[in-house]
Amino acid sequence: MALPIAASPSPDRPEIPRLLFAIRYCHPWIGGLEKNTFNLARELSGRGLPVTVLTGRFFRSWPASETAGLLLIRRLPSPRIRVLGAILFLAGLAWRLLTQRDSYDIVHAFQVGHTAAVAVLLSRLLGKPSVLTLAGGGSGGDIFRHRRTPWGRMVLRACLQATRIVTLNRQMHEELAAVRCPENRAVYIPNGVDTERFHPRECTARPDDYAHKTVVYVGRLAAEKGVAFLVRAHALLQHTLAARLVIVGDGPERKRLERLTRRLGTTSLIEFTGPADDVRPYLWQANVFVLPSKHEGMPNALLEAMACGVPVIATHVPGTGEIITDRATGLLVAYNDVEGMARAIATMLTDAALSRGCAQRALACIRKQYTFAHETGRYINLYRALAKRALPSAPAQPGRDAGNP
């Protein structure tokens, strides 16, 4: 099936750019970047922008293509074999970009890597504007991680050829400057949360069917997420405060975390739920949400918890430190400070005035700055600004620009 081609615009409205998203891991793959990319594609298509997503097909049970209105998802062969799978996917991606070049106007890649490098270089070859959204900052982020090896630096240089590079937090902006990326090519667009789906529960009372107050973590169980650090802090609480820890998600660290809980003697107070298609029920039962990451970009799980009116605690790292003001919209703790994290959880669970005030101010902050409508609107402005060059017939639109918010 050929990629969809948008209908010709009517004379009385500007031409609508057709978007091609390039991302190897996407829906139904579970992860913050993957989920946000899928939601963005769905929202943009709902607003009238044709979007094609080229992503990987890792399981035969996944359909090769799906359509919903102006959204088309094409899953290219990507066997779960470390090198071969990547090569086959990249070959398929390059073929699609080249042979279907008349069906899209702007290429949007996500996260520095081989997929983005191929997408950006081929869009440049074809004379089409491209957008690259960085996924993370700090020691585990896109830029620092790829500067460690010669091959990584080559991939990074290719990705930085994108027409515009989207950063999720201020430190990522500084990291771009450190690798000599021109300032006018960097655009700050933080992630947003769908406040129609994520909102405080109508009944403000917490469920009374649990003997202990509930601490919730949502996310991948990977080393960089710091869940082992959270489990150790939770164990310290048992001497002074009974608290139940619910860990929502899955990943390579799960078995190690389960062994750790047995060693600490907290198995009866910790629940591993596995992955969840809908995390709202867990957030609505939470007395406090904790994000113990080593590094982040702009964490969706944290934004969702804040939008649900849950008091939050997070590590003071780039991304989270930009969202949370300590003791105003949440509590910030240094990464791997086990005793500090235990104290912060105890404070949130016992100081009703502090937790209630933080939750209310955090909710107001989300609604003012971090809604999905804000994020989508900023991307639409960016695409339209780029389309003025790609689509010279499009008339000017007063009051619309792709500048930083």
Image (cartoon, rainbow, N blue to C red):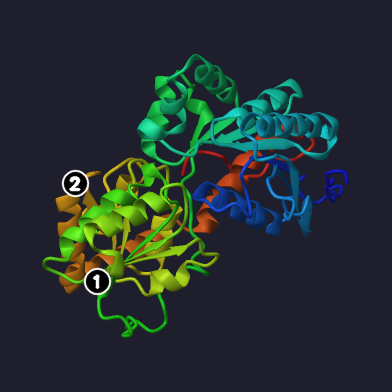
Residue 210, horizontal then vertical, whole percent: 30, 80
Identify the residue at horizontal 65%, vertical 51% (top origin): 41
Residue under label 1 = 356
> Above or below — where is 199 with respect to 217?
below
Identify the residue at horizontal 55%, vertical 52% (top origin): 36
Q: Is residue 361 left or right of residue 122?
A: left
Q: Is residue 18 left or right of residue 246?
A: right
Residue 379, horizontal then vertical, whole percent: 58, 45
Residue at the extreme top of the image, as rendered: 150
Q: Amino acid at mark 1?
A: Arg
Residue under label 2 = 337
* Residue sitting nearer the eye, 255 or 213: 255
Give the mark nearest the N terminus, 2 or 1: 2
* Residue sitting nearer the eye, 401 or 297: 297
Report the number of numbered marks.
Answer: 2
Marks 2 and 1 sit apart, C-alpha to C-alpha, by: 24 Å
Residue 61, horizontal then vertical, whole percent: 73, 55
Name the element at disc 1: helix
Dot label at residue 181: none
Q: Amino acid at mark 2?
A: Asp
Residue 26, horizontal then vertical, whole percent: 62, 48
* Residue sitting nearer the eye, 335 or 17: 335
